[in-house]
Image (cartoon, grey):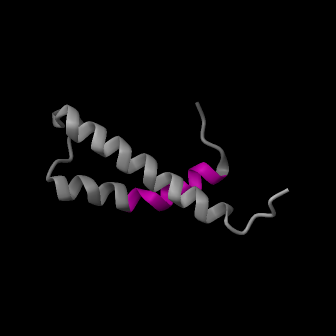
Amino acid sequence: MKANIDEQRAIAAASPAIGAFLEDLGKSDLAVLTSEEWLAFLTHAYVSVCAEVSKIWENEVPF
């Protein structure tokens, strides 16, 4: 699966917030996350990227 250009921009923009989540958790090795931490990480990453996509599309013509 390949991200489109807007998704790539959103991922790049959300990366600092996603990294900050791991820093706050005190873990950088994804392999050592508990199930709950892994799901929280995925949720945070998903919501962060979606928010960035929304910002990118905010000024797009709706048709």
Left or right, 59 with reference to 31: right
Which percent across, then down, holds residue 37? 21, 41
Which percent across, then down, holds residue 44? 36, 50
Write the start and end of the magenta stretch as one range.
6-16
Residue at position x 28%, y 44% from top?
A: 40
Q: Quadrant of the N terminus?
A: top right
Q: Residue furthest bottom?
A: 59
Q: Give yes or no for residue 11 being in the magenta stretch.
A: yes
Q: Quadrant of the C terminus?
A: bottom right
The quarter holding residue 4 reads top right
In this rendered view, identify the residue nearer to me: 52 or 8: 52
Left or right, 60 with reference to 19: right
Left or right, 14 with reference to 17: right
In this rendered view, identify the residue nearer to me: 53 or 15: 53
From this view, report whether residue 10 is shown above or below residue 29.
below
Residue at position x 18%, y 37% from top?
A: 33
Residue at position x 36%, y 61% from top?
A: 17
